[in-house]
């Protein structure tokens, strides 16, 4: 017999009051509560006592203490969003390079210093516990780290934001350098479990692949069904994302692929043990590895499966959440904003369209209008090889219903061009979502552009180039649709957490509020020339360099001098990022030292780090060359006290947190027009490193902010690069004309850095001298070396260098991800903050 409604409500209220009392018992922020919670979790959660607990056990116990204190805020945040009927932002990204969570969460809830003292009384070092946590390396580089910074800022700004991605079992590979070459090893971040995540099996969703499309009449309308499919289940795992001291805790929801049938008992009993679990293995491969090798057709298919899998899971989840409080889709685009982080999630556009048409019975015009008002697309690259296209044949095989919808989207879009200046056949072919000239492929950037209400670049120069070179006719068709939102980084992780001593100095000058208002750093300008502040600034920098030197010694065996100039380039290894140009300068320095040691007056330590894609042969050759040059240079007595070269293995977020505070010179030397934005350049400047760079990506805006006299500029501009290319660029003529350049390349060609094997680096020389030097290294070589001489002259004036470095910190306020997210919220999403209060 059903209970009376009054009894049900009374029971719920009684339950809620009891839960609040439990919260008070489990979430105290005072010393006795934290001490008791730590010991309780060590005993009852981990199952250890003071006799047999290891550092990892203490880490897990502390992580649970912090998680308890996030939980009340997390649940209250979701309640607040429902009560406010808030517009929610969903950030879809194939990568989230989150790094470690413990220190970041402690800082966010204001407990880091207190917990360090409490643990110290037990003889436990908090830093040691933080080191027990593996990096959540679910990203390849800047794209994934940007997504992580954006989640941090959405929570800090109290915006109702959610991240959606894949819970890769193996994230970005661990990089080992063996005999100078990159070797990839599986990165098992989940090997010992993850205390920060919560599985949510109640929100398990099915995802379809393959099959065929069938049509039927229903209530006088033709309906399409996707049938005979192979299905996979998506299991959500939620991670809390804490705002900075504001009680907001947002959600990162990552999807894990699960088989619909775990095990075929009949096949097992028949003796075929491998086939009994085959379907499970095939299904769960989808969320197994970040970026499977797509050099083969099977790899390409798995990659597309990954993209659709997480998109389908996410769209189903977004629609479910909306329909929890709304009867229909009338207000969907008023309450939902979906941001596509690059083209990887672009299949979300036809997926939402499919759900609206096939599942909920909306008409085309209404469904398509909802899609266009809901989606926005961030472009992250101008490189043709990085602009995703998929063979129509593969799409028709894997996602037949979506291919039908893409054809219809494209047909209607091209028809809309009739009667406009772009209605001719040539323009239509260039604008078409289907590339008829490229072997029938789907242009995902075009799909994302047609299906979104806004497209944004990630730096002012990048956005100009999107309008001018990548999507010029789309810009002409819809003026104002393409906008700029320059990237940013979170100052909480990249200054407050990574560089606590500098952060403390800043607080003494500018006050407490700068971590959430980075424009306050401008107040540092008044002390930039103060000799005592400069001395303290140099002291902190040296302490950071000493700490990094210990890591370098432990990881590579190379001892480096903390009083030398730390010249650093850390980022993904790619030809356009021009790590090779950096190496050419190192070889030039080495040759100068060999000819006349007095010629090089500044002791320099060159640190290069980054991972190459496993199948990128040229990038791997560059790593091998860096290692070969380092081996020769570091072993030569002539370079002692003059030059050291180190390749830093396994570059990752936790290592980056040690590198940026210790760096003196930031190498941002990509070919002008190739780097969309960069965020490493911002982290370096924020931590007081001076930039040597080209006018590329966000370098342009960094130079504008810090002022030209505090930036070492070199190289051709975008226009000069294009002019040089159009006139017929001849790199071999530069080789013949520049004796120093010729000596550098000849040394590499002779095998000076490959144990006498001249063929090892021949592909590099061929790329530079015989295959056109695509990224104009030789054209910028002399300008780069001249700028490096300016660096040396400035380094020899410590007061001038210190002033420039302090001004870089002071003027880096624009490059907070809070500013970026504020611009997205205002100009693209139409989302407003929804502050959270624990008091009810």
Image (cartoon, rainbow, N blue to C red):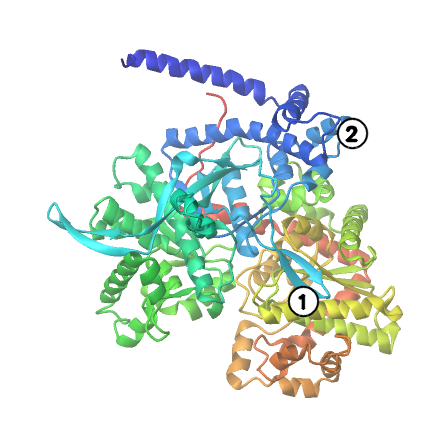
Indicate which disc residue 623 carries: 1
Which residue occupies the foreground of this view, 715 or 52?
A: 52
**Total of numbered circles in the picture?**
2
User: Mark 2 vs mark 1: which is more N-terminal?
Assistant: 2
Residue 109 image-quadrant placement: top right
In the rendered view, tell whether residue 331 sits above or below residue 453. above
Question: On the image, which quarter does residue 126 sit in?
Answer: top right
Residue 295 at x, y = what percent?
49, 67
In-front residue for pair 235/730: 235
* Residue assigned mark 2: 123
Above-or-below relation of 461 to 25: below
Relative to residue 29, is residue 518 depicted above or below? below
Is residue 642 visible in this depiction of the protein? yes
Image quarter in which the N terminus is found: top left
Left or right of 818: which side holds 235? left
Residue 366: percent from left, percent from top: 23, 49
Quarter holding residue 378? bottom left
Residue 828 visible here: no
Q: Is residue 357 above or below residue 721?
A: above
Q: Is residue 577 left or right of residue 837?
A: right
């Amino acid at each position: 017999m059903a209970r009376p409604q009054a009894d049900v409500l009374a029971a719920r209220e009684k339950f809620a009051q009891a839960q609040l009392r439990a919260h008070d018992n489990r979430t105290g922020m005072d010393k006795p509560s934290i001490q008791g919670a730590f010991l309780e979790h060590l005993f009852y959660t981990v199952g250890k006592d003071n006799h047999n607990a290891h550092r990892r056990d203490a880490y897990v116990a502390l992580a649970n203490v912090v998680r308890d204190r996030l939980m009340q805020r997390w649940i209250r945040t979701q309640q607040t969003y429902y009560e406010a009927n808030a517009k929610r932002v969903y950030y879809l990204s194939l990568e989230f390079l989150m790094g470690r969570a413990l220190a970041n969460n402690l800082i966010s809830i204001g407990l880091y210093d207190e917990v360090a003292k409490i643990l110290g009384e037990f003889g436990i070092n908090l830093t040691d516990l933080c080191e027990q946590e593996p990096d959540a390396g679910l990203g390849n580089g800047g794209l994934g780290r940007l997504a992580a910074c954006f989640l941090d800022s959405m929570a800090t700004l109290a915006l109702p934001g959610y991240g959606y991605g894949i819970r890769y079992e193996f994230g970005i590979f661990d990089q080992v350098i063996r005999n100078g070459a990159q070797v990839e090893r599986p990165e098992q971040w989940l090997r010992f479990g993850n205390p920060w995540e919560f599985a949510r099996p109640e929100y398990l969703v099915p995802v379809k692949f393959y099959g065929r499309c069938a049509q039927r009449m229903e209530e006088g309308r033709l309906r399409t069904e996707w049938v005979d499919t192979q299905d996979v289940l998506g299991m959500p795992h939620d991670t809390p994302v804490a705002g900075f001291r504001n009680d907001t805790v947002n959600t990162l929801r990552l999807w894990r692929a699960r088989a619909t049938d775990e095990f075929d008992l009949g096949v097992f009993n028949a003796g075929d043990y491998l086939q009994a679990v085959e379907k499970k293995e095939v299904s769960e491969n989808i969320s197994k590895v970040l970026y499977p090798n797509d050099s083969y057709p099977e790899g390409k298919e798995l990659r597309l499966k990954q993209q659709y899998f997480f998109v389908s899971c996410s769209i189903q989840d977004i629609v479910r959440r909306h329909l929890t409080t709304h009867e229909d889709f009338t207000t969907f685009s008023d309450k939902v904003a979906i941001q596509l982080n690059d083209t990887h999630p672009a299949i979300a556009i036809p997926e939402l369209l499919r759900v609206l048409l096939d599942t909920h019975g909306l008409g085309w015009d209404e469904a398509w209008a909802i899609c266009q008002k809901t989606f926005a697309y961030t472009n992250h690259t101008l490189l043709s090889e990085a602009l995703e296209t998929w063979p129509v044949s593969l799409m028709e095989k894997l996602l037949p219903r979506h291919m039908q919808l893409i054809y219809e989207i494209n047909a209607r879009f091209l028809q809309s061009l009739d009667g406009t200046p772009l209605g001719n056949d040539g323009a239509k072919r260039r604008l078409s979502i289907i590339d008829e000239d490229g072997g029938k492929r789907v242009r995902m950037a075009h799909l994302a552009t047609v299906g979104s209400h806004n497209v944004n670049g990630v730096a002012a120069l990048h956005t100009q180039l999107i309008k001018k070179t990548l999507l010029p006719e789309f810009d002409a068709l819809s003026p104002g649709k393409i906008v700029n939102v320059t990237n940013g980084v979170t100052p909480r992780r990249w200054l407050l957490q990574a560089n606590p001593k500098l952060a403390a100095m800043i607080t003494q000058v500018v006050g407490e509020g700068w971590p959430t208002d980075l424009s306050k750093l401008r107040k540092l300008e008044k002390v930039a020339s103060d000799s005592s502040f400069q001395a303290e600034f140099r002291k902190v920098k040296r302490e950071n360099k000493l700490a990094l030197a210990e890591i370098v010694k432990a990881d590579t065996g190379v001892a480096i001098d903390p009083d030398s100039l730390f010249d650093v380039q850390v980022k993904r290894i790619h030809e356009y990022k021009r790590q090779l140009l950096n190496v050419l300068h190192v070889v030039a320095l080495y040759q100068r030292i060999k000819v006349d040691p007095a010629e090089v007056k500044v002791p320099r330590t060159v640190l290069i780090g980054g991972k190459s894609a496993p199948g990128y042969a040229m990038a791997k050759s560059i790593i091998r060359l860096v290692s070969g040059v380092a081996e020769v240079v570091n072993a030569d007595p002539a370079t002692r006290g003059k030059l050291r070269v180190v390749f830093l293995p396994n570059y990752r977020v936790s290592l980056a947190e040690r590198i940026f505070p210790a760096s003196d010179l930031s190498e941002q030397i990509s070919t002008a027009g190739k780097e969309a934005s960069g965020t490493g350049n911002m982290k370096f400047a924020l931590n007081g490193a001076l930039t040597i760079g080209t006018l590329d990506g966000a370098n342009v805006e960094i130079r504008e902010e810090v002022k030209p006299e505090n930036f070492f500029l070199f190289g051709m501009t975008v226009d000069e690069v294009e002019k040089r290319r159009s006139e017929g660029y001849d790199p071999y003529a530069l080789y013949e004309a520049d004796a120093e350049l010729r000596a550098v390349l000849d040394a590499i060609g002779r095998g000076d850095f490959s144990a006498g094997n001249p063929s090892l680096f021949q592909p590099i020389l061929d790329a530079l001298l015989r295959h056109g030097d695509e990224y104009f290294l030789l054209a910028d070589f002399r300008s780069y070396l001249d700028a490096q001489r300016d660096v040396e002259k400035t380094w020899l004036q410590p007061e001038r260098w210190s002033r420039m470095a302090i001004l870089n910190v002071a003027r880096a306020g624009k490059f907070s991800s809070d500013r970026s997210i504020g611009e997205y919220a205002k100009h693209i999403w139409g989302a407003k903050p929804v502050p959270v209060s624990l008091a009810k």
